[in-house]
Amino acid sequence: MRIPIVSDGYRFIIPLFILSGIAIYFCLTVTSIVLSILTIFVISFFRDPEREIPAGEGVVVSPADGKVVKIQDVKSDAIYGGDAVCISIFLSIFNVHVNRAPYEGVIKKVVYNHGKFLAAFDDKVSLLNEQNSILIESKNWKKILVKQIAGLIARRIVCWVKEGDKVERGLRYGLIRFGSRVDIFLPPDTELNVKVGDKIKGGINIIGRLKV
């Protein structure tokens, strides 16, 4: 059975696989066990399964796998450009870390900020941590903002889209390596379909419906 792997992961998987093989060849039992376990973990981390994306007018899907840790009203976010409701999703090291576009539209902004590496569940991460934001505008001029936020272990945010790109709902658009958080900002009148504590999957679970 083939395991789909995001291409960004091979730079980590191949060296580990080679080192594991060398350790096994020279009968370095403990080292080979450690390296083999680490190789399996990295393969699991970079898995990129196919997803069946829900259809429907106004449907917003989760941009990430993980657990909903916070839902709050936000006043005048600088990048979003107004009031919004924010859903924060915490990704553990065991979740799929490929991020997906929650809605179809045009990328109006891509904003990257250097920052710290606090634990992803810390309330301060949305202000202090390294992060990358994309602002999507739908054909009905609805705005959806998604922030990839680095965590304590995450040291690299990858974004594959740029300003002006058109994206479809569920499109793979980025990746955060090794633990992170994703915040999604929606119009205040969005009908939410999740609550704090829910475990959700990117591109599969409907987190809300826009009023269109």
Image (spheres, rainbow, N blue to C red):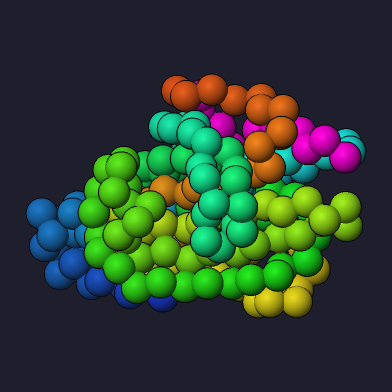
In percent of width and height, residue 138 lies at 81, 56
Q: Nearer the viewer, residue 154 or 27?
A: 154
Q: How many marks?
A: 0
In percent of width and height, residue 198 lies at 51, 24
Q: Say whether residue 169 is visible.
A: no
| Quadrant of image for the C terminus | top right
Residue at horizontal 88 percent and vertical 52 percent from the top: 140
Q: Nearer the viewer, residue 207 or 177?
A: 207
Taking 174 as reference, is 54 above or below it?
above
24 drawn magenta = no
In percent of width and height, residue 62 lies at 62, 41
Taking 51 as reference, is 21 above or below it?
below
Q: Is residue 185 left or right of residue 67?
A: right
199 drawn magenta = yes
Taking 166 as reference, is 140 above or below it?
above
Residue 197, quarter of the rendered image? top left
Residue at horizontal 52 percent and vertical 72 percent from the top: 111
In percent of width and height, residue 25 lies at 22, 68
Q: Nearer the viewer, residue 42 or 156?
A: 156
Residue at horizontal 49 percent and vertical 34 percent from the top: 72
Residue at horizontal 51 percent and vertical 42 percent from the top: 74
Magenta stretch? 198-212
Q: Say whether residue 119 is visible.
A: yes
Taking 97 as reference, is 9 above or below it?
below
Residue 91, quarter of the rendered image? top left
